[in-house]
Amino acid sequence: MIPLHYYLVVSALLFSIGTVGVLTRRNAIVIFMCVELMLNAVNLTFVAFSNFLGSLDGQIFVFFVMTVAAAEAAVGLALMIAFFKNRESIDVEEMNLLKL
């Protein structure tokens, strides 16, 4: 049996890597990958606490988080494809398309 704090340390490291990636990268695809990494870190925490407490509530919540993450990825990629068709780049610095 692996102790709970091991899972929490790994989850914190994954979340930190994702946060640094979101804050420092300029490529939209890499930013979306880092957001997905952050969501997976939170999912790992939910599953670890669910196992520790002997409840299925955390695992059910993970199912809903994964569903929302899949929808977010689909919409985000569709927006990036549309942006790339207009600007020939997916650099976040150039994403002022909605400004007038």
Image (cartoon, rainbow, N blue to C red):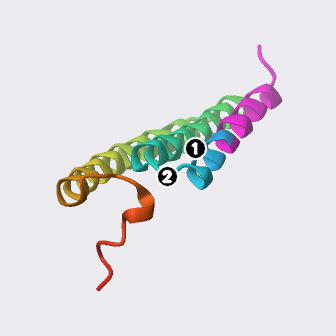
Secondary structure type for disc 1? helix
The residue stretch that appears in magenta:
1-16
Q: What's the CA distance linking mark 2 and mark 1?
A: 17 Å
The quadrant the C terminus occupies is bottom left
Q: Residue at x 19, y 60 (%)?
A: 86
Question: Toward the viewer: 24 or 52?
Answer: 24
Q: Work out which quarter of the rendered image holds the N terminus and state it.
A: top right
Q: Secondary structure at mark 2?
A: loop
The answer to whether residue 4 is above or below residue 31 is: above
Q: Residue at x 44, y 46 (%)?
A: 32
Q: Quadrant of residue 10?
A: top right
Q: Position of residue 22 (x, y in %)?
A: 56, 51
Q: Nearer the viewer, residue 83 or 63?
A: 83
Residue 69 in magenta?
Answer: no
**Disc 2 residue type?**
Arg
Q: Three-letter amino acid code at disc 1?
A: Met
Dominant secondary structure, magenta: helix
Q: Residue at x 51, y 47 (%)?
A: 35
Q: Earlier in the sequence, mark 2 or mark 1?
A: 2
Q: On the rendered structure, is 80 left or right of 32?
A: left
Residue 47 marker? none
Which dot, 2 or 1, sits closer to the camera?
2
Residue 95 image-quadrant placement? bottom left
The numbered dot on residue 26 is 2
Callout 2 touching callout 1 (CB < 8 Å): no
Left of 21 or right of it: where is 5? right
| Residue 5: in magenta span | yes
Few, some or many residues within 10 Å of mark 2 (<14, 14–19, 20+): some
Q: Which residue is mark 1?
A: 38
